[in-house]
Image: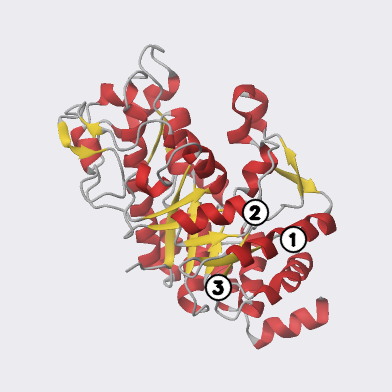
Amino acid sequence: MWDLKSRYLPAVSGAMMNMGWKLPAVEAGHPDKMLTFWQDNGFLDKPYKYMLVSAFYGIAFQKGKEQSFREMCDVGKDVYILGDSGGFQAVSQQKILDPADVIAWQNQNCTTGLILDVPPYEMAKSREDEEEEGNKSFLAQFGAEKDFEGSLKYTLKNATVMKKGQKELLNLYGVIQGNTKEKAIRWFKTLKHLDFEGWSLAPKPSGDPDTLQWWLELAYEYLEDAPLHILQIGSPLAVAMTTRFCYKKYKGTITYDNSTPLKLATNYRGYMDRDGGNVLLGSRGQGEKEDTKKFLAKYLTAEGKLACPCNVCQTVPLELFQNAESNGALYMALHNIQAYNVMHEYIKSIAVDTDKLRMFFARLDPKLRAKIMPTRRPITAIMDAIDNIGSAEVKVQQRLFG
């Protein structure tokens, strides 16, 4: 039913659950269409039947109601839901989650669930957080390692509870943490005896190609082609590395999630293009903001329409995108999902062709390219390193240099 071979899962946040999914697209003149991306009568060119939902948000959204998350949001059984445990949100928002509650919610709503891990890191402010004090939960990120052994101990305890509560129809994945390959291996070996149906990797920082590479090496060496989910990777380079690894080295399926397309729209009215870049549109009533000027200069045609060919951009008036009192953020979120997935599918189509990948990255906006490639290694060298995972030469180097 589902193609999970290098598959992107849009991460649905609590804010988006409360913004009015399932509303009809009346403002755009299509009351027969719903503002969803997963329904057959949704507002996309083609429904996208994959998503990640955090149990942290799902449990809160469902609390006190008789219906399940699937029933409340009209998410059919044909939609693949990966239920994140909510470990990151629990740490960043200083809340306590009960693993029994998490597995009960996953059993009720999800195709696959992740165990409730305890990330062994402190929370740190990002540079943007210093400017946006009112948005800490969105901008919070992991900092230095903290209490690795204690975190592993509580993760094992939570995982044991969840494994006992797992029902037959749910696939349960273990989650591997660690800021070095050696620590991640230790984490994996501690949980391995629980016989999960798959594994989830938590690279940090997820956008760093050197970090992602050793996580992929770990998967190849230890996980025996088990189904994988990689948490929060979304840059074009990370997608290219993961997809190439999936097609050339790894026999199991690999999914990954990314919250940027949806959160960018709902938090900032950010509009994504098909190369992975974005421009902040801003909201009507804020005057001629510099962001809005950039947006109009980049995406507006001479006829006054958006250049993007997706049905959202060709149907929704520009002023609706900008109207802070409308559902413009939801329309933009639907555009972003389509734009991101076009990029994802194109990268998948060229992932094993190094020359085409090199040309793709060469034509990116220089600022975007510098952001997503924080390394001096050329794209050819990065892809060669993926191809060499598990080779005899690499094994000799590992034995000699550790």
Disc ID at residue 99 = 2
The kind of secondary structure element at disc 2 is helix
Residue 197: assigned label:
3
Q: Nearer the viewer, residue 365 or 341?
A: 341
Compared to residue 388, the image places residue 104 above or below, namely above
Does residue 168 appear left or right of residue 1 in this picture?
A: right
Residue under label 1 = 157
Q: CA distance from mark 3 to mark 2?
A: 18 Å
Residue 93 on image: x %, y %: 66, 36
Question: As shown in the figure, which amino acid type bears the numbered disc 2?
Answer: Pro
Q: In this figure, which colouring scheme has been used for the structure?
A: secondary structure
Residue 124 in the image, given as x and y percentages of width and height: 73, 38
The quadrant in which the N terminus is found is bottom left
The amino acid beneath tag 1 is Lys
- Contact between marks 1 and 2 (CB within 8 A): the answer is yes
Where residue 355 appears, x then y in whole percent?
42, 68
Q: Residue at x 65, y 29 (%)?
A: 129
Say if mark 3 contacts mark 2, CB within 8 Å. no
How many labels, in total?
Answer: 3
- Residue sitting at x 15%, y 29%: 29
Q: Against 212, is 397 above or below?
A: below
> How much space separates mark 3 and mark 1, taking CA atoms?
18 Å
Q: Residues within 10 Å of mark 2 (few under 14, many from 20)?
A: many
Chain-order first, disc 1 or disc 2: 2
